[in-house]
Amino acid sequence: PLRRPDRRPHPAGRGHRGGLSRPAPEDFAGAAVADHAHQDQEREKKPHILVAEDNDLNAEILMEILDTFGFTAVRASDGGEAVELFEKSQPYEFDIILMDVQMPVRNGYEATKLIRRLNRPDAKTVIIYACTANTFREDQVKAREIGMDGFIAKPIDVNKLMQKLGLGKRGEKR
């Protein structure tokens, strides 16, 4: 027979007719409250991310991945909106920007230049990763020259993304 992990063997041991004992109902309530508090605390520690991605399907997948791993994220559907959302946010509200390079209105390079020029304390320090399928050496050099902090190749490898975001494989804290 299968044993659920929330049930403990009866102190009388094997052969006792009761078999397994259940924790008192208040134990479940306390555990649930503690678990929610732990989840909230973990969420607070994880970066708040601005996702600049014009492709709806790519954005939906990326937002779902981030949510699955407990990150909070806001989406901008083009480079102009990314600049606008960052500019209207509170200083240090966003820890990381995942910036698609090829977008309408403003491409990722133009949006990054504008963000870096903003007159606010976090404009020069917010981490901006270029997200693109163009991963040639000259693309990486250009990204660094205009103020991006690194590259995330498309299609996005979830384990590599989590490493960039400060987590190990499959979301384990490093």
Image (cartoon, rainbow, N blue to C red):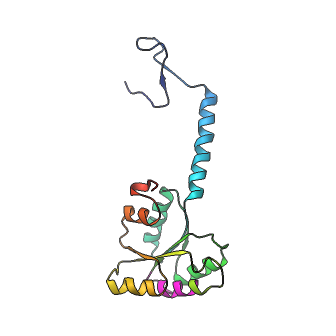
Front residue of 17/136: it is 136
Which stretch appears magenta? 101-115
Report if residue 5 is visible in the image. Answer: yes
Point out the image quarter for the C terminus.
bottom left
The total of numbered circles placed on residues is: 0
In reply to whether residue 114 is colored magenta, the answer given is yes
**Magenta segment: does it hold 149?**
no
Residue 64: x and y in percent read 47, 61
Query: Residue 154 lies in what quarter of the image?
Result: bottom left
Residue 129 on image: x %, y %: 46, 75
> Closer to the camera, 67 or 43?
43
160 left or right of 26 in image: left
Quarter occupied by the N terminus: top left
In the image, is 36 to the left or to the right of 136?
Answer: right
Is 153 placed left or right of 37 in the picture? left
Percent position of residue 20, x then y: 47, 20
Q: Residue at left 49%, top 83%? A: 147
Can residue 53 be seen in this snapshot? no
Question: Which quadrant of the figure has residue 100?
Answer: bottom left
Kindly identify the residue that appears in the image at 40 percent across and 55 percent down: 170
Q: What x and y, as percent, mark residue 71? A: 53, 60
Instruction: State the residue lying farthest toward the left.
Output: 136
